[in-house]
Each structure stands twice: as C-alpha cells, then as structure tokens.
Image (tube, rainbow, N blue to C red):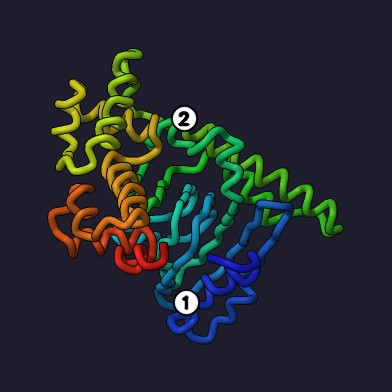
Amino acid sequence: MGGTPQTAYARWLSAAVPLMHDLDWQRHLKVEQPGEGISMALLDIMPREDAHIAVSGPPTFSISMFLEGAGTLSIDGGEPLEIQSGMAVFCTTDQTVTGLNVIRGGTRLRMVDVRYARSFLTDLGGPLWRNYGSGLLVDRSVPEQGALMMGFPASPPLLLAAQQITTCPYQQEDVRRLYLRAKALEILAGLITALREAASEPELRNERDRQRIVEAQQLIESRLDEPWTISRLARAVCLNEKSLKSGFRTHVGHSIHAYLIKVRMEAAASMLAQGQSVTEVALATGFGNLSHFSKTFRKATGLSPREYARRT
C-alpha cells in the first residue's frame, strides 16, 4: 500500500466493494496517524456475504489484532492463514507482494491494524525472527517473496492495548496522538514478548555450530553455480538439516532458498552491468535454463536481464 495512510487503507478496503454490495466502507474504517512512522486502521464491518479483497503493496511491517470475526489472509504462493477472534498476525515484507484477504459474510469483523516504518526493525536490532526465532502457532510465510506472515493467539496485554485503541478516551488531537502512539509501542513490545516466549526453534549447541552457519553462507556466496540443496549444503558443513534450516533463518534472517536466490540475483545484476552476456550470467549463477533465469531475475528486479543490461 502506498500514499498516505488514509488513501492506502481506503484502496485496500475499496477492493472489496463489488462483493460487499452497498456497504459504505468509509463508515466502517477509521485511520489514525499518531506520529512519524506509525499508522493504524480500525475496521468494524459485517458484510452480508463473503468479501474477497485482493491486496498489493510495497514493503511493510505490521501487527494486526482481531478482536472479533473470522476469515483468511494469504500471500500469493502461500497457504491461507485462518483468522479468528483473539488472534494476532505479524507481517513483514521486503518487496512488493500480492495476496488475498477474505472476510466471512454474516460475521462482524473488528480489527486493529498497526503499521510501523521499517526503521523500527533497525531500531530493534534487525529482523525480529533473527533474535527470537519463529516458532509461532501458524507460519504462512513465503520466503521466496521476502514475506513473513505468522499468526498466534494474542496475549491479554496485546488484546487489551488493541481494545484501548478502539475506545481512546481523548479527543484533543495532541493528547490523542500521544496516547495512540504509546499504545502502538506497547503492542510492539507485546509482540517481542510473544516471539520470545513462543520461540521453539532448536538453539545451535555451540560456537562451532554457529560457525557452520557462517560457512554455509560463504559456500553459497563463493560457489554461485553449485546446484545447492539443503541436504547437500548440510553435508558440506557437517550440520544436520534441521539445525541448518533453523539456524540459517535465525542468524541470517532468510530461509536458505531465499538467501540463495538473493545472492545469485545480486551477482547476476553485477555481471550484467559489467557487460557479460545473459547466457554467461545464467550459467555462472547456477541456472541451466535461460527462461527460468529470466523469470527469476525479472521477479527480483522488475526488469528482464536484457533490459537491465541495456539500462546499465
């Protein structure tokens, strides 16, 4: 979602209008911007029939609390995440993604969605899952799209903060903004607490295992044409697959596959800019199929390899 918070949320919900008949969505959506880098939407709606909302937006970092209602959220290429009352959803993306949200007809949906500038992740020391793991109730992430989405039962403090946002007692603008900003930060603190408590990824046993994760990174970066699989990489660094996968996500911040694609596409862009042919670059980055290489490169950069080479 781009533009101001008001127009961004408006576009998101207006996509549902054809399936929501004559519902006046503007009466059901309230948007607040309590300070630099924070925006929030309060949605209270009950469509007569299931409402399907196609969504598309740039990088985001958001936390949603569902006080009432039912439906699904999904990122294209991933499985739907079932939502219900008392659930929280944490989502972060590092590129434009598309998906589909469904609101169940005949059921009231009350939701508080808080969006934070991605600089908040930097202030927290990087991606949250890098520090605390990702063992939450339901994981519907799509790593190859750089999209993380997880749902879990919201703790009482999280639900209370969301409820207090919907019933903010202050009308004076400066006091209201201060109150809502404090609640947004309270929700962020609640998320970190939930991630800490729910993390169930096995810890790497010692410094030697952590070093093996570093070695796996270095192998991917230095041998771009290697047909890496998780089992092959695990054998190469003498670490079991489960520890390699969980350790990679925790310490690198990406799944193995997502990191492999990221490194290869960065190297491919550099080679194309230096004048190497598309075929040479594809082979050098582990793609035996030119069509697959072109499709992957376009998805990562928005341009075909030849278009990128011409522009650079």
- Image coords of residue 104 (percent x, y): 41, 68
From the viewer's side, name the closer residue of 57 and 137: 57
Check the image and report above or below for 290 versus 175: below
Residue type indicated by callout 2: Asn
Q: Which quadrant of the figure contains the C terminus?
A: bottom left
- Image coords of residue 155 (percent x, y): 53, 39
Image point (52%, 70%), residue name: 12
- Image coords of residue 256 (percent x, y): 28, 39
From the viewer's side, name the closer residue of 117 and 99: 117
State the residue position of label 1. 16
Q: Is residue 140 visible?
A: no
Image point (36%, 51%), residue name: 270
State the residue position of label 2. 131
Identify the element where label 1 is drawn: loop
Q: How dense is the environment of label 1, judged by Cα within 10 Å: few (below 14), some, or many (20 and up)?
A: many
Query: In this rendering, would 190 be left or right of 288?
Result: right
Q: Is residue 302 visible?
A: yes
Image point (65%, 69%), residue name: 6
Q: CA distance from mark 1 to mark 2?
A: 37 Å
Identify the element where label 2 is drawn: helix
From the viewer's side, name the closer residue of 262 and 13: 262
Image point (17%, 61%), residue name: 290
Q: Nearer the viewer, mark 1 or mark 2?
A: 2
* Residue at the limit of the structure toward the front, as seen here: 275
Residue type indicated by callout 1: Ala
